[in-house]
Image: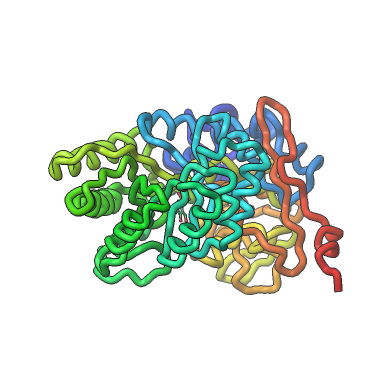
Amino acid sequence: MRAHEAGALHGDLGSRGPAWLRTPQDVNALERELWPSTVRRSEEGSLTVGGLDVRDLAATHGTPAYVLDEADLRERCRRFRAGFAGADVFYAGKAFLCKAMVRIIAEEGLHLDVCSGGELTTALAAGFPPERIGLHGNNKSAAELRKAVESNVGRIVVDSFEEIDRLTEIAKQYNAKPKIMIRVTVGVEAHTHEYIATAHEDQKFGFSLFGGAASVAVEQVIKGDALELTGLHSHIGSQIFDVSGFELSARRLLQLHKQIIDEHQRELPEMDLGGGFGIAYTSQDDPAEPADLGMAMFGLVKRECDALGIAMPRLSIEPGRAIVGPAMFTLYEVGTVKDVDGIRTYVSVDGGMSDNIRTALYDSSYSATIAGRASEKPPILARVVGKHCEAGDIVVKDEFLPADVRPGDLLAVPGTGAYCRSMASNYNHVPRPPVIAVAGGTARVIMRRETEDDLLALDVG
Ligand SMILES: Cc1ncc(COP(=O)(O)O)c(C=O)c1O
């Protein structure tokens, strides 16, 4: 099927594949992974989500806007819970957080990983059960730690010797014994589906396993007896597509665990293997199902525990992007179309690196489609760029769009739920877009659009 036959595609994309996106060679079943589950192509050729036409969403809420498919999001939460039954699934709030998101995570029975005072405040403001919150961060302030202890969060993942001292002091002041995990740098660095094992870990997070800092931290916490050590933690990276990195990390954590049992006669009830499960940003990505991940990870931890002769700790994981990434897309309006002869066509949209910094920051790949209509024109190679004063202000590096792409077109970029709104900036004093949650034919604004007055309100000079 040719890309310009897009208009022929109606109804359930799952059965036929969203072939309007790409050239024939690129069309394959994986493209279904790119879009939230309720996205359809209407009879008129526009996208619908949650039963609503993106043209109506754009008319009511303006562009750019992040559009969240709530049914898809909830389904992803459920798949992770089911796939990791018997473990605790901490949604990593850094991927995207607001009060409505916190409530959805609470309703779906997940735990919540926060990594700053601001994220903790948001979670508590939305009424999230504190015992299901874990606090992360390599440089938590005394105020952040105090707030975590005061509000009785379920765990604090300790990341430095200074933090052990700081938290010990605070615990004494509050006459409390906070539950903590120790973040271990296990020497496994994951880059998408590869990993490289390094003896020396050149990064800011955690206590080094090979350098011996992790053992010293454990000993200090156990001997200090002011903090309740519940387990070891590791997070090996992001956009990971195979479990071998987790396997190595689990093996190393469990070896340390065994050493703790032998040296301190202390069994730790929990172990956290972090997040980082990959999602589809383009049709080249092939993410695993949570059920398969769960089975593989339980299996490998069980094998290691059996080999070491220790009881299996309760597992937890911290997926962020795999929960919210694919549940959202960004809706833009095209403003200018510029042909650079013999090279490519530059399609400028009304947002850019201020609402999605990932392309500029990580050289990430995205895809895009014209969302408001179908086109009979053949595809051309296009680059979707933003409106910012940077040549690197690229949203989608390469995409085939119909040759008649023009100003006024709506353009949708899928897979923008994670690390887009949460990393959004006001660069060039461009206000940040709203987040519109859509479900069952209804749209609600869960984060409103920032205004120029909001920007001026901060400017008190
Ligand atoms: C400690 C920790 N846990 C979980 C995550 C979530 O990663 P992802 O969104 O790739 O699942 C991160 C991401 O940076 C992290 O640092």
Q: At 74% from the left edge and 69% from the top edge, which residue is drawn?
A: 428
Question: How many numbered callouts?
Answer: 0
Quadrant position of the C terminus in the picture: bottom right
62 over 455 or under it: above or below:
above
Please state the horizontal and vertical placement of residue 187, each as a whole percent of the image.
28, 63
234 over 393 or under it: above or below:
above
Which of the 4 image quadrants contains residue 160? bottom left
Kindly tell me whether residue 22 is visible in this rendering.
no
119 over 348 or under it: above or below:
above
Q: At 39% from the left edge and 49% from the top edge, which residue is drawn?
A: 274
Please state the horizontal and vertical placement of residue 330, each as a whole percent of the image.
64, 48
212 over 228 or under it: above or below:
below
Q: At 36% from the left edge and 45% from the top edge, which residue is drawn?
A: 230
Please state the horizontal and vertical placement of residue 38, each as a whole percent of the image.
58, 31
Nearer to the camera, 26 or 386: 386
Please state the horizontal and vertical placement of residue 84, each as a whole percent of the image.
37, 33
Which of the 4 image quadrants contains residue 455? bottom right
Nearer to the camera, 34 or 344: 34
Q: How is the image coloured?
A: rainbow
